[in-house]
Amino acid sequence: MSYQELWEQDKNHVLHPWMDFSVFNEQGCDIMVKGDGVYVEDAEGNRYIDGMGGLWCVNVGFNDARMKKAIVDQLDQLCYFSPFTNLTTPPAAKLAAKLAEIAPADINHVFFSTGGSLANESAVRIVHLYFNNLGMPGKRKIISRYNSYHGSGFLASALTGTTFNHAGWHLPENMVEYISEANVYRPPVEGMDEEEHCNYLVKEFEEKIISLGQDNTAAFIAEPVVGAGGVLVAPQGYHRRMKEVCEKYDVLYISDEVVTAFGRLGHFFVSEEMFNVTPDIICAAKGISSGYLPLGATLINDKIYDVISKPQIEGGLFTQGFTYSGHPVCSAAALKNIEIIEEDNLLEHVRDAGKYFEKKVKELERLPIVGNVRGSHFMIGLEQVADKKTKELFPAKLQIGKMIAKAAQKRGLIVRPIGHLCVLSPALILTKEQINTLVSILEESLLEVTTKVNVHVK
Ligand SMILES: Cc1ncc(COP(=O)(O)O)c(C=O)c1O
């Protein structure tokens, strides 16, 4: 089939996530056909460093022979069997035990699904069941944050606090409440230092619980470092203090580690190891199987398990579950993925190379349109501004992020444009040499775009 035919088929029949229909009919899609290590190749034979790591997920890199073998070996054994009621498969059991081993403290039980949205939705359902079983059915509201991203199921899209995602759709009513994002670059009052900012956010959270009522508030959900909502690293101590507020009001803490877990920041899980918080629930997906196969996991602590593992009513069942919960082939892929991360010392590599990556990209703040470089390790965002002093953004219609992504693609690098941001989340095997190449391509691309948008730069 020719490139043109494929392009047409896709354009005529695929409904793409987050498609911009103002340009789709004319532009269609780029077609990716191959991946190897940190590189991908498109249908026209162009090779790129994949600065997106698929979509924050191809952690061990493309085309890893060990991953492929583990998947085929499991297919040889058993391609699928039901996970419902009292049936299981060896990979699901082994993976749950391994996750319990690497997860913080008393997080020992795993509910499997097929991705991040369902991991988060399952977390909320489990929270509701927990409080219902405790005789507190009023405790059902979830507090999320503006500009968070938690997925796009009916409930997950409501947990997501990027309000432009809500426009034109219906959301479950009276379920999710929002508080401010923790954006150090754009604090609520310009000039606020990190400590004042943190105090402001913690106070706002506490006031929110008080206004909703402790008896109505079930859980707080937060990403340790926000991903798609702007790559935001919260002020120092923020997560710990938010957890303290949760404990004060008997509100559960759900840590959405869909992006941050499995090595992106140099740890299997970061909530406790980097942010000194032991969540009640951790949600994982993406890097859990490095994107080789779809998998989501909702990890819960003993306290919750003890309550929800008792029938709510005579003969009551735990009625949450999917055909593909604990899919044996996906679980085998995840087990091998974790083994590779351990065997290849990828966590140590990210802790070292990730710091170098942060430093190198941060140097791009010297360029006139780069207002802020932020993030952590292999999760970095660059925010473009027209005026560095006032942090004024470029006109939205200019699509500055897309302009940079296009300029980079021309030079052999894929970056992810999100509004006025460019996001980098490469495979964890990226070497320092490859980091240098990536950063120099990005610099050239930013300079090219700067000359194009010079009329706006102040
Ligand atoms: C932090 C976070 N949570 C949840 C999700 C949703 O995951 P999925 O797209 O696998 O449903 C994403 C996806 O990007 C994410 O970044």
Image (cartoon, helix red, strand yellow):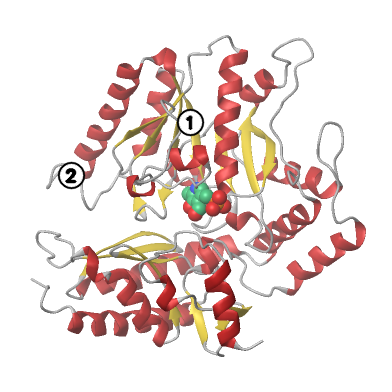
User: Would you say residue 176 is visible in this rendering?
Assistant: yes
Residue for badge 1: 253
Given the current orientation, which residue lies at the most extreme right position?
A: 77
**Looking at the rendering, which quadrant does residue 160 occupy?**
top left
Residue 408's spot in the image, x, y percent?
A: 38, 81
391 in relation to 239, above or below? below
Q: Is label 1 in a helix, a strand or a loop? A: strand
How far apart marks 2 and 1 lie (CA) works out to 26 Å
Residue for badge 2: 193
Which residue is at a point 47% across and 75% down the rendered structure image? 28
186 in relation to 425, above or below? above
Which residue is at a point 66% across and 51% down the rendered structure image? 295
Which residue is at a point 31% across and 24% down the rendered structure image? 208
Task: State the mark number for residue 8.
Answer: none
- Viewer-side residue, 422 vs 260: 422
Give, as a three-letter code, the residue at label 2.
Asp
Residue 279's spot in the image, x, y percent?
A: 52, 34
Mark 2 surroundings within 10 Å by alpha-carbon count, few (fewer than 14), some (14 through 19), many (20 or more): few
**Looking at the rendering, which quadrant does residue 438 occupy?**
bottom left
- Viewer-side residue, 317 vs 426: 317
**Looking at the rendering, which quadrant does residue 375 occupy?**
bottom left
Instruction: Please give left or right for residue 296 compared with residue 219 in the image.
Output: right
Residue 317's spot in the image, x, y percent?
A: 75, 22
- Viewer-side residue, 260 vs 48: 48
**Quadrant where the C terminus is found in the figure:** bottom left
